[in-house]
Amino acid sequence: MSTALSQRVLHEYAAVRDSLPAGVVSPERRQEAIQALAARDLPTTREENWRYTNLRPLERVRFAPAAAPGSASSPASGAAPAAAPPCASDLPARLEGFARYTFVDGAFAPELSWPVEHAALSVRSLRRDAEQHRAAQGTPEGGSQAHSRSATVTRLPHALPALSTLPEARLALLNEAFATDAAVIHVSGATAELPRVELVFVAVAGADSGASYPRVQVALDPGSRLMLIERHVSVGAGANFINASVHVDIGRGANLSHYRLQQTGARATWLDTLSAVLAADARYGLLTINIGGLSARSTIHAKMAGPGAQLTLSVAALGDRQQVLDNFALVEHIAPRARTEQTFRGIGSGRARVAFNGKIAVREAAAGTDSRQSLRGLLAGPEAEIDLRPQLEIYTDDVRCSHGATAGKLDDNMLFYLLSRGLSPEVAQRLLKWAFLEDVVSKIEVPDLRRQIEHDLAGQMADAAALKELL
Amino acid sequence: MLKIENLHVKVDGKEILKGLTLAVPTGEVHAVMGPNGSGKSTLANVLAGRPGYEVTAGSVTFEGRDLLALAPEERARDGVFLGFQYPVEIPGVNNVYLLKAAVNAARKHKGLPEVDAFEFLTLVREKMRLMRMEESMLSRGVNEGFSGGEKKRNEILQMLVLEPRLAILDETDSGLDIDALKIVANGVNTLRSPERSLVLVTHYQRLLDYIVPDHVHVLVKGRIARSGDKSLALELERRGYDWVTGEAA
């Protein structure tokens, strides 16, 4: 299966490669990525760390990028006509104090964006930069690629990291090869006011007309701070194919709060790779709410590269119907005295499968590592499945690693207690599911965002109750 | 108000209640006493509708309706309240939220609009003062981290706010020191009225010093072995359960 699939990826790449923007990823780098992908193949469920993912949609999707609605240039020539472009009212409500940058099918949409000036903050769309640069040079659209490439590459504040060789991260290669834009966020130093940025990735195109490649590069200089919200949503009922790649680089003593909300449409396939590198004493609070899509897979690879780095990784996943929500997280402790706190809360209703595979690797030099892992799953449907896999790989003696993983059903005593107070079974179950997610939801430090998420979670649960009545 | 006739109940295939008959008229307080394993808690739970209790014979009518045909939440909305022997901790579900959801469920059932948030909080605060509970307990998870005594006081608080027609208090006195017992009893007494009935399930006579019952029943091996007025409780205290169990055997 996979080899034929890889062949098709190569074929589709060859067909569109000349129209892919060089300012986003250089042609050399794209070529390198596509060759690496061809050599290593796309993942299959026969591989240990992919066994819970639903990779079947890959067989049907078109890998070439969708034409962003409203955008003049269409990299995927021959694609089906794009759906109507989304408008501001299609998007989640804006949050006060946050700049918003919206990307539609992976390409920057300035008309849906509200930038905010901040002395230490720079947020750019590489595609737009390249276009503006071309315009300033008087080069016509579609002009010399070599020219635009040399112009934008020199303006990159941070070089891209080497392509990951981690088998779990190879879907990032697909993004690398096909990306049509990239959001590049750079915080250059400490400021009194915390910079707040929201990225909204909107998928519109159906998988038959093309894929969406959200791409984010975040770099925090030493001592700087950033609060980042990253949302993935769908507009319309298309079966989107989304392949996101996020790279985070947190400098010495810098602090990043990163909220990721996966709320794509009911037919969407969402594949995601996030890699993060933490320097000495860096702090990274990464909180993911994974509730959308038909098939979602998130791969997180965090490297604790500097002594004293701290990572708080919290994931809540709420699956219903036939959703497959798979989460894989590898935290590598390379430097000494770093701390990781990992919390997963997953609920499976209907016939959903919700998985968390969390691996913590402590290398020889990582003495004094302190890691805690708490994974809990709740089976809220007779045909639902929860898979929890805590993995520890320790190569040094001086460590403190604790982990716990439990999966079970709603507590009968709790349920009866609520019923005995007059609550309906539906409300009682919703309340208990709610309570279960509290360990993650309560960590959201932006009150407006927390309210939004609570509302969305409640909505997801309400749907579940309504669906059950229909069946 | 409540009429239990020839009730037989099995738990895990074992018969616990073996033909229990009991009538509690409106406005009365009845105490059901009995040794361990006599079926006291089974009676309380089966009246509230806890799953796992199989009624094999007999009937229970509440205000003329078949109580056993109702789901637990319907019984609650109709005004049946169970004070739990072991109140459940539910971290993440806020106390005040549960109270409000419970009140609104009953109001909706009666065709009334939702309770006004401000008036509701005022009422809850007043009842909390009566139960000598810290206001901070409202925003905590249901019974989360509460001491045994706090949990029991929280049960009575819920009862005071819900104002049931029939309250069944399952060993509400167990695990309480004398001060907490007085607070709990005081709370229960404020709810006594000609329209309301109370069933106190208890092992010890002590609670009945503070909540004086109209009738006392002794439950032995799944049946009411003896009924009387409050002096029966005092006699039990003096002579021990052996006195009745010996007779029943």
Image: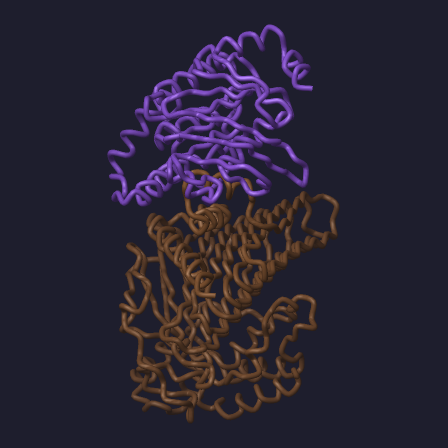
Q: Is residue A396 left or right of residue A448?
A: right
The answer to which quarter of the image holds residue A79 is bottom left
* Residue B156 located left or right of residue A384: left
Q: Residue at x 41, y 70 (%)?
A: A183
Q: Which quarter of the image is occupied by the N terminus of chain A?
A: bottom right
What residue appears at the point 48 percent right and 74 percent down from the top-left corner?
A242
Q: Residue furthest top?
A: B238
The colour with which the image depicts chain B is purple
Exactly how many numbered labels are in the figure? 0
Q: Judge whether A280 appears above or below A325 on screen.
A: above
Which of the two residues, B118 or B156, is positioned nearer the viewer here? B156
**Is there any visible trace of residue A25 in the rendered image?**
yes
* Residue B156 sits in quarter: top left
Residue B112 percent coordinates (x, y) = 26, 43
Tell me which residue sits at (46%, 24%) in the image: B199
Q: Position of residue A273 (x, y in %)?
A: 54, 68
Q: Quadrant of residue B6?
A: top right
The brown-tinted chain is A
Q: How is the image coloured?
A: by chain
Q: Is residue A116 above or below residue A22?
A: above
Is B192 situated above or below A204? above
Q: Position of residue B83 (x, y in %)?
A: 47, 29
Q: Is residue B139 among the parts visible in the rendering?
A: no
Q: Nearer the viewer, residue A43 or B62?
A: B62
Left or right of A198? Residue A337 is right
Judged left or right of residue B194, residue A239 is right
Q: Position of residue A141 (x, y in %)?
A: 33, 90
Residue at 53% x, 68% y is A322
